[in-house]
Image: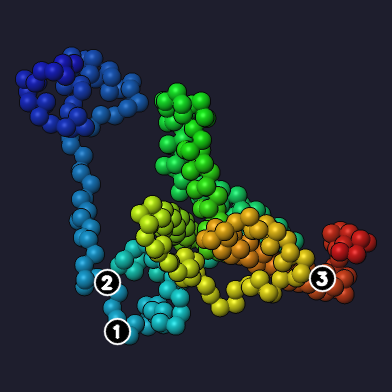
Amino acid sequence: MVWPFTSSSNGAGDKPLEQQDPLKNLDPSLREFLEKESPVRYQTSPSPSAPSLPPIAPPTASSAPSTTAPSKGQPAAPSPSQPTPPMVYKDGRYAHIWKTYTPQRDVEAAFQSPEEKLQNIIQAYKQRRSSIGAAAMENCAFQQWEQNECLRAGSFSQKLNMCREESRSFERCYTMNAKFLKALGYLSTYERSEAEEERVQMHADRLFRTMVEREEQVEAARREGREEPVFGDIMGEVKGEGDLKVGDLKPGVRKELEESVKKLEGVERDVAVKARLKEIEAELDLVNVSKDMTVGGEKERAERRAKGQSTPKDRFFALFGK
C-alpha cells in the first residue's frame, strides 16, 4: 500500500491510478492465491485510452445558413411573408424542428371549449383590474416611503396630525396614477407583453409628474402676482380613432359619469372622465367577446345535437335555455 502523500520509490506515483499494479509489492504466493480466488482481474498493462475527439469549433460566418438556393436535401428557408420561427442557435441548427413548433398556449387553446375560453377572458380582465393597483403603488413608492418615514421618525407635530400632508400626497399619487393607467387603456388589452405594460406604467408616472410640475408653476405664478401659465391637454397625445365619447353613452350612464366627476376640476376632471370612458369601453369589449363566444358555443352545440353527439353539458344548456 502506498501512502498518498509520499511519492512511490518505483515511480508509480507519476502514473495514473488505472495504470498502477495494486498487487506488485505482495508476496508471490499471496498474489497467486488472489489471482486465482478473486473474481476481479487486474490488468497490469495500461488499457488503451479512448480516442480524443477534436474540439467543436464555434460557428463562423462560413457555417451560417447560406442565402443561396438550398440543395435537394436541405430544407428551404422561410419566405419573407411567412413568420420566422423562433431560433435558439444562430447557425441554423434544428431549424427543421422549429418549423413545426407550436407554442403550448396555442395547443391548449385549440382544445378549449367556448365556455373555458370565455372564463379565461373574464379572469384576465379581473387580473388586469387588480394589477392597476399594484402598478400605481409602484409609481408612488417614494410618496409611500415618505409617509412611512413620517410615521416612524417624524416630529411630534407631524405625528400629532397623523402625517396629514404625507398621507394626502401618497393618496393623491395613488388615485391619479390609477386613473392615468385606465385612461391609457391599461384595461383594454388582455394579451400584452411585459415590456408594453412597463411602458404604459412609466408613461402614467410621467403624466402624473408633469401634472404636479404644472400645478407648482401655477402656484408660483400666483404667489409672485404673475399671469398664470396656460397648458394644453395633458392627455391629448393618447387620443385615438374610435375612442368612446361622452355623447355616445346612454343617458343613465352619462348622468352617472357626470355625478362622479362633479366635484373635480381642471386636469383631474379630464383624466377622471377619460379613465371612466376607457373603463366602459373595456367592459363593452368584454361583453362583445362574451356574445361571440356564446354564439359560437350555441352553433357547436347545435351541430353536436344534429349528429346525436350531445354531451351532458349540452343537455344542461338546453334545459335551462343558456
Q: Disc 1 or 3, which lies upstream in sequence?
A: 1
**To which quarter of the image does residue 303 belong?**
bottom right
Which residue position holds label 3?
298
Query: Counting other residues with Cα less than 10 Å from the Cα at mark 2, is it few (<14), some (14-19), or many (20 or more)?
Result: few
- The residue at 87%/75% (across/down) is 306
Query: Counting other residues with Cα less than 10 Å from the Cα at mark 3, is it few (<14), some (14-19), or many (20 or more)?
Result: some
Residue 154: x and y, percent?
42, 27
* Viewer-side label of 2, 3: 3
Structure colour scheme: rainbow
- Of residues 79 and 194, the one nearer the viewer is 194
* Distance from the alpha carbon under mark 2 to that under mark 3: 52 Å
- The residue at 55%/58% (across/down) is 268
* Viewer-side label of 1, 3: 3
Residue 255: x and y, percent?
74, 64
- The residue at 73%/61% (across/down) is 256
Q: Amino acid at mark 3?
A: Glu
* Distance from the alpha carbon under mark 1 to that under mark 3: 51 Å
- Of residues 108 and 232, the one nearer the viewer is 232
Q: Amino acid at mark 1?
A: Thr
Secondary element type, mark 3:
helix
Asked if the residue at tag 3 contacts the one at tag 1, i.e. Cβ–Cβ closer than 8 Å, the answer is no
Image: 198 above or below 287? above
Secondary element type, mark 2:
loop
- Of residues 252 and 76, the one nearer the viewer is 252
| Residue 32 visible, this orientation | yes
Q: Disc 2 or 3, which lies upstream in sequence?
A: 2
Asked if the residue at tag 2 contacts the one at tag 1, i.e. Cβ–Cβ closer than 8 Å, the answer is no
- The residue at 53%/43% (across/down) is 171
With 83 as the anchor, is 305 left or right in this view?
A: right
Which residue position holds label 1?
68
Residue 64 image label: 2
Query: Counting other residues with Cα less than 10 Å from the Cα at mark 1, is it few (<14), some (14-19), or many (20 or more)?
Result: few
